[in-house]
Amino acid sequence: MVGSQVRDSLGRRVFARVGTPAILTMVLLVVVAWTGFLGWALIALFGRLIG
């Protein structure tokens, strides 16, 4: 019981320290990826319409 409690608190401490920046980084990566994809799609669409 004591070992699992120590492991739990250690995991919570690590997540509290690293979790928020990691989540923000993942959200930022997803937003950048979607922006790049949408920009690529718009360029392709305009290229077909103009060409």
Image (cartoon, grey):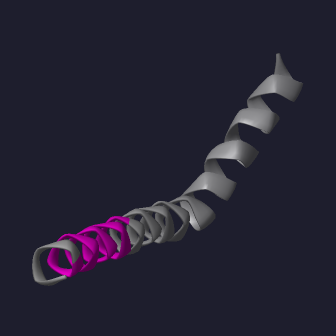
Q: In which quarter of the image is residue 2?
A: top right
* Residue situated in front as seen by the camera: 18 or 13: 18
* Residue situated in front as seen by the camera: 10 or 39: 39
Image position, residue 8 (x, y; %): 71, 34
Is residue 36 located in the magenta-colored stretch of the structure? Answer: yes
Is residue 48 located in the magenta-colored stretch of the structure? Answer: no
Image position, residue 49 (x, y; %): 11, 75
Prevailing secondary structure class for the magenta stretch in the rendered image: helix
Task: State the residue lying farthest toward the front.
Answer: 51
Residue drawn at 88 percent across, 27 percent down? 3
Relative to 45, is 2 on the left or the right?
Answer: right
Task: State the residue lying farthest toward the right.
Answer: 3
Up the image or down, 12 lies above or below 22; here it is: above
* Residue situated in front as seen by the camera: 13 or 38: 38
Residue drawn at 20 percent across, 73 percent down? 48
Residue drawn at 75 percent across, 29 percent down? 5
Image position, residue 47 (x, y; %): 22, 80
| Count of numbered circles on the image | 0
Task: State the residue lying farthest toward the top.
Answer: 1
Q: Quadrant of the C terminus?
A: bottom left
Relative to 10, is 34 on the left or the right?
Answer: left
Residue drawn at 74 percent across, 47 percent down? 10
Relative to 41, is 5 on the left or the right?
Answer: right
Q: Give the range drawn in magenta.
A: 34-47
Task: State the residue lying farthest toward the left.
Answer: 49
Image position, residue 4 (x, y; %): 81, 24
Q: In which quarter of the image is the N terminus?
A: top right
Q: In which quarter of the image is residue 18?
A: bottom right
* Residue situated in front as seen by the camera: 42 or 19: 42
